[in-house]
Image: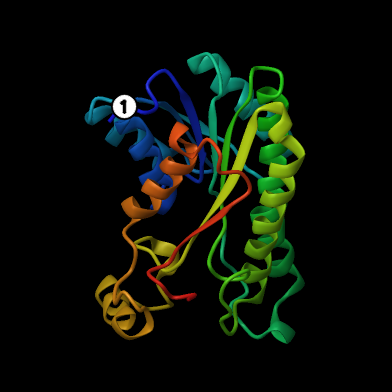
Amino acid sequence: MNRFTGKTALVTGAGSGLGRAIAIAFAAEGASVVAAGRTAASLDETVGRIEAAGGTAAAVTADVTDSGQLRDLVRESVTLFGGLDIAVNNAGILRGTVPVGEVSEEDWDAVLRTNVTGVWLAMKHEIAHMKENGGGVIVNVSSNLGAHLRMRNIAAYSTSKAAVAALTRAAALDHIHQGIRINAVSPGVSAAPMSLQPGETEADRAERMKSESPLGRVAEAEEVAAGVLYLASPAAGSVVGTDLVIDSGSSI
């Protein structure tokens, strides 16, 4: 399919994991992709994979905690490919995996700054462009942890992702009248490095999920990407402010 031919898609956190899978999936369906993140080498690898498959992409380094860098990222996306039709705010970190009373202030601040404020800042600049240029689509990457599922020793991350879900709904309501359609996707344990527990291998994770997941396995990164592409596509034209959970049934 070529649902996104002629469209420009910006993906933050595109240097690895779900972000890379999402960027590759958009390019495979015709979009010109801006792969954004903090590490140039990993972004270049993502772009290399896209180009090797015949797609179009460019790497742009940016830190989502820096408003000026995000403003410049949107501007560069428009300069590179002529517009900004779709933005996927995927960048996030996981720190402070200890009980609530033991989370350091540094870890708490870092997680909230990246995972919540970073999404808000990204949307702020994406929306500023989209509302002056005929609208667009934004998909924020949240998590099943927080709004849908609780787990011990992960309070900072869960809090941040629950906030992303709430922020997404608020933004969707505020900006749909400007032609900007905003939704979220909430993955569970998926085939990405962040879902590995300390010292765990991919084989260990697969074994763990046989008992932890109703489906008996992790979600493939490509399956999560498919959900993002659906939300960004014309087929989801009346989907506004939803939170699509893709977690192999773990939060049922």
Res 161 quadrant in image: bottom right
Q: Say if 116 sits above or below 104 in the image.
A: above
- Left or right: where does residue 235 sit relative to residue 71? left
> Which quarter of the rendered picture does the N terminus lie within?
top left
Relative to the observer, which residue lies in front, 101 or 187?
187
Assign a secondary structure to mark 1. Answer: loop
Residue 166 percent location from the top left of the image:
70, 57
Residue 6 percent location from the top left of the image:
41, 18
Res 23 quadrant in image: top left
Residue 181 percent location from the top left of the image:
61, 36
Which residue is pictured at 62% across the width and 70% down the height? 146
Relative to the observer, which residue lies in front, 3 or 200?
3
Q: How many marks?
A: 1
Decide if residue 43 is in sight here: yes
Which residue is pictured at 28% across the width and 27% down the height? 51
Task: Name the residue type under label 1.
Answer: Asn
Res 30 quadrant in image: top left
Residue 124 percent location from the top left of the image:
73, 36
Task: Name the image colouring.
Answer: rainbow
Q: Which residue was labeled with disc 1?
A: 2
Decide if residue 65 is in sight here: no
Circle 1: is it few (<14), some (14-19), or many (20+) Cα within 10 Å?
few
Q: Say if 111 sits above or below 174 in the image.
A: below
- Left or right: where does residue 55 sit relative to residue 58? left
Which residue is pictured at 73% across the width and 31% down the height? 177
- Left or right: where does residue 16 sit relative to residue 222? right
- Left or right: where does residue 194 sit relative to residue 129? left
